[in-house]
Image (tube, coloured by chain):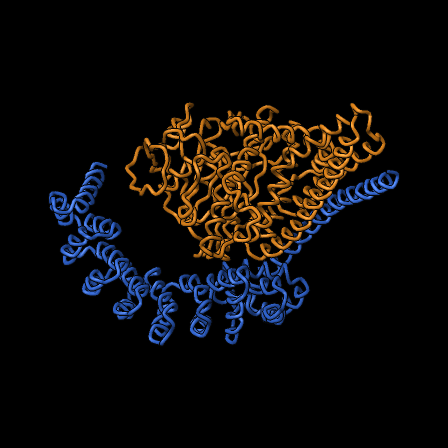
Amino acid sequence: MRIYSSLVLASFLGLMAITLSLFLIILVRRAVVQFREREYAARYREIEVELLKRLGESSLEKTLAFADRYAGFPRVLIDVLLNYARLLWGEERAKLSVIFDRALRSRFRADASSRRLVRRLYAARLLGFFVSPGDEAIIQSFLRDPPIVRLAAANAIAQAPSMDAVPLIFRAFETDEVGNAHAYKSIFFSLQVRAENGIRESLRKPLDREKIGILIEIVGAIPICALAEDVAAFAGHPDKEIRLRVARTLGSICLPNLLPVLLRLAGDEAWEVVAQAVKSLGRLGSPGALDVLTQALFSRQWHIRYNAREALLNMGPEGIARLDRVAKQTLDHFAADMATMGLIDAAAKERA
Amino acid sequence: MKPGLLVLIDIFTRGILVYFLLINAAYMSFVVLSAIGILRHLRWTRYLQTKEIFASPMAKPISIIAPAFNEEAGITESVRSLLALEYPQFEVIVVNDGSSDATLPRLIETFGLKPVNRIYRKVLESQPILGIYASSDYPLLVVIDKVNGGGKADANNAALNIARFPLFCAIDGDSVLDRDSLLRVVRPFLEDPERVMAVGGVIRLSNGCLVRQGQMACLRLPRNNLVRYQILEYFRAFLGGRMGMSMLKSMLIVSGAFGIFRKDIALACGGYNPNAIGEDIDLVVRIRRHCYREKIPHSIVFVPDPICWTEAPERWRVLARQRGRWQRGLLQTFRLYGRMVFNPRYGVVGLFALPFYLIFELLGPIIEMLGYLTFVLLIFWNKVDYPFALLFFAVSVVLGTLLSISSIFLEELSSKRYPRFRDIFVLGAYSVLENLYYRQFLSLVRAKAFLDYFRGRNAWGKMEKKGFDGK
């Protein structure tokens, strides 16, 4: 028992020492953190004031001198540059790039190819503002990285890519692995109409169906009306997913000349495609779709019936008259119920 | 006394010693793992600011579900805080779960709600919905008035039927979320949208703090001793326990007070179980079971910095009711899903997470109570080595204190901390004090929960809340 007691006593003293040390560490750490936060804030203010002066001048030498002076504080300098890069355009943004090239470019390249995840993550967020021709491989490597880096890179590229960067991003997309293709979605979306040429060129290339699907989806999400014909060309694609996306995208673009394509898709063999085409026809609002939409109310699929009802409600008095006719028939009570619910909704909307 | 009985008691006391060592070793390992996890999280998120997530087109919309049962004291502040959240696209669905107080009238009056005819598909069963309300002044807000379903699960199911978005955030009706908490908690869904099924955040106690316009305006330690103990307990549970479990890919609890789930997976699992006492652990275990059975790659993650503030009980009796219910919920989970325990088909959950909860969380209080009982018997038989017993007690107090101090350290690492140095000293003192009676009280309550469960006493019990107006 004496051995046990000694053991327990030793444990007690050891644990006591650890506990007190940890408590001390907490206090010291807090003091250090508060000091560092103050120091960071002061340095940030100093760099910011100096940067604003440089932005107001045209002297390249002074800008380079500024970059040299603060190259030793990369963390604060990057934060200042990034915050101002979000706000500035044109000549001022170009000055930020000059500072970046001088003070941080080599560090950025080293970080981007570092084996340490944190350093790559650190570099990834600079991509959008300070990417330059030749960085294509860096984009691809970032988008193949673990999710956290991928997200940071996609966010960075998505926020402010220069026009030089756009073809670069599409080249990276075309040559990248299929599994990585979805990482480009948000980037394309953020490009908005600037993505038009890139998407058109990519759609004409023999890409994997997954990549084609993404491009079609993006056309609808932005939307880019000028690419309607390019998308409609895929309406006869053997893959159901592609046809589905075509139907959805054409519904978002809403051009009257797309009616025949959507009518064809409304007769597709896959019910998912039909449901989507019916929905898109409703958005189009063309009277030429009334017969097909009325017929869709008799579908065996709930989704098709529901979309047809909503579509007819969108078509105004003509659509409501069709719903009324279907509600009164007795051959198909599912169709009648769906039409009746539509009429109730329409009446409620009218009252409101 | 018979020598056979003495031998038996000797074996039992040794067993308890081994158990004591194991449980403390496990908790200390969790603290170390959590520290690694929090440091890694901080290092990564330092470079990924919330405004970048806000700008990301990949951020999926979220339906926030807040069930409210007799929450008239704090419901308007809570809803205001929810409506003020920073997130690109979200809706707030408040479920008035058959309140008998003025919860619904207060909501209607404050937010100018009017009855609407909203179309929805009844995918999950719930008690009948009496009305759906919306407001043109607050387009993000939807209020459901329904017949009381006897628990949060039924209210959440009703809201899930109405919810429009692919992610939902389940919170308590009286909780206050930090303004950027959704942006922080959604990060794992952006990083790994295919695998992440649910994400849990940190719950902290709002007692004593100042809440203004639905936001935490001033962080202060409360004066109430009981709440101070609970603050330490929440630090240990969330920053120590759940972070550690998340590091081991074994998360089993995403708190019902603040967690985000993928709606499709929750619906595939049948939504919340209305008969579950602990609806949060029940749902997570069913999601895990579903994913393992269907061979779906999945992960459930804990993020240490998004914070939800909730009110803790300030009276012993109310605390006992709350903890008893949590323990009964855990017990029920093992009765319902006991087949998963030690079952290799369920991977790390079956082989590690569930056994851990069974041995240390579920049986822990009973073993502890048996230990105290044995000690009393030994005193009665005059078989106690008092110097050794005293030393052992001192070691257990220091170990408990070390665990609490470690959790204060973890809280210091994660961003939101009590601002004054004095607070650290106060919490340090309470880390020692809680080992003298608070922990024993909780063990007693949790052990008693077994009896209540088998006697069929499974009601939620009344919770007393002051609301944020009173602070």
The quarter of the rendered structure image containing the N terminus of chain A is: top right
In the picture, measured across the screen, residue A209 lies left or right of residue B421, that is left
Residue A22 seen from this side:
yes
Residue located farthest toward the right when viewing the structure as drawn: A2
Residue B225 image offset from top left, x and y in percent:
66, 28
Residue at (48, 64) in percent of width and height: A157
| Quarter assignment of residue A345 | top left
Residue at (26, 59) in percent of width and height: A251
The colour chain B appears in is: orange
Q: Nearer the viewer, residue A191 or B347?
A: B347
Residue B443 image offset from top left, x and y in percent:
65, 31
Residue B186 image offset from top left, x and y in percent:
49, 50
In the picture, measured across the screen, residue B103 lies left or right of residue A144, that is left
Residue A62 seen from this side:
no
Residue at (40, 34) in percent of width and height: B95
The quarter of the rendered structure image containing the C terminus of chain A is: top left
Q: Nearer the viewer, residue B262 or B392?
A: B392
| Quarter assignment of residue B205 | top right
Q: Which chain is blue?
A: A
Against A171, residue B183 (above or below) is above
Against B385, residue A119 (above or below) is below
Q: Nearer the viewer, residue B55 or A84?
A: B55
How many numbered marks are there? 0
Against B287, residue B118 (above or below) is above
Residue A228 image offset from top left, x and y in percent:
27, 67
In the picture, measured across the screen, residue B77 lies left or right of residue A233, that is right
